[in-house]
Image: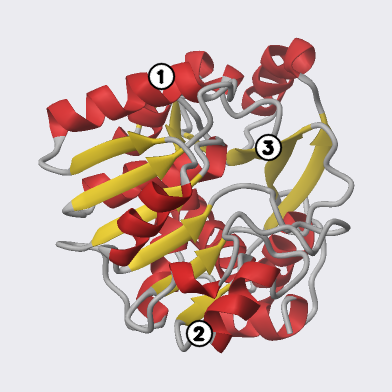
Amino acid sequence: MRYEITGHTTLIGLLGSPVGHSLSPMMHNGAFRALGLDYCYLAFDVDEGKLERAVEGLKAMGARGMNLTMPCKNAVVSLCDRLSPAAQISGAVNTVVIEKDGTMTGHTTDGVGFFWACRERGFSIPGKKMTILGAGGAATAIFVQAALDGASEISIFIRETSPFFPRTLQVVETLRERTRCKILICTYEDQRLKQEIRGSQLLVNGTSVGMAPKEEGCLLPDSSFLHPDLTVADIIYNPRETRLVKMAKEAGCQAFGGSDMLLYQGAEAFRLWTGEQMPVEAVRERFFA
């Protein structure tokens, strides 16, 4: 299909620093072409100090919205007029929709994308227990969405020395007030970790441990921590299969890496901006095969 920038092309931006490695421009522009939509997605290297001016510039130019990546996910929250429940609770936004009057609604699509990937594999979180390793931005989006979607229990493993620890306490307190989910904050003790995983139906690595080039990293000492009825997920997409994912498959678990989360969080942002469903299979074949 022929695709050209026109005088009517609608702009969507990615703001953050660095952004040169991002797959999002290729993914979204490929989807726009596939559906014949007159949109264009561009990446802009913007740090926190330039964020407010960049956002005002996009609004002034009539952009439809933007994605935010580090270090801008938290800083953009105060610039939004409205927040989705997940964005409000987590205190982070990765997708903004700009209305014609300039008002902005902030969303976090990471959790939605993650559980979309889970459902594609036949796993549904309502009524289930999840253990998650880490409490950074993506991990927080996942456990917030899990609680909002009806998870029965969540065990969050985080080091007390982590810079995310104070924020995690606040987020968990809010979730306890707003949901019926039982949430535990745990430290990395082998026996406690093994105990919580044993009672879980879903285990998520929400940390960067195992990411290239340190591909041998894994927070589980060995496969004795796993059981065959467990679904195991890693948010890391490089490498495609982390040591954790390989270990889980060898132990008989259903396991998958982070590429589908990346794809589906983008698909949810695409829907919010355009009102259309991203052709995910075509995008997967083109950019994630």
- Marks 2 and 1: which is nearer the front? 2
Q: Earlier in the sequence, mark 2 or mark 1?
A: 1
At a point 51% along the width and 23% down the height, the residue shown is 160
Q: Which residue is nearer to you in this view: 103 or 90?
A: 90
Mark number for residue 251? Answer: 2
Residue 155 lies left or right of residue 43; in this view the side is: left
Residue occupied by mark 1: 81
Q: Earlier in the sequence, mark 3 or mark 1?
A: 3
- Name the quarter where the C terminus is drawn: bottom right
Q: Which residue is nearer to you in this view: 108 or 221?
A: 221
**Mark 2 surroundings: few (<14), some (14-19) or many (≥20) residues within 10 A:** some
**Mark 1 surroundings: few (<14), some (14-19) or many (≥20) residues within 10 A:** few
Residue projecting furthest to the front: 191
Spot occupied by residue 154 in the image (x, y as percentages of width and height): 28, 48
| Count of numbered tags | 3
When the figure is inspected, residue 289 is found, relative to residue 23, above or below; the finding is below
Label 1 is placed on what type of residue?
Asp
Label 3 is placed on what type of residue?
Thr
At a point 14% along the width and 62% down the height, the residue shown is 127
Tell whether label 1 touches label 2 (CB within 8 Å): no
Q: Which residue is nearer to you in this view: 67 or 190?
A: 190
Tell whether label 3 touches label 2 (CB within 8 Å): no
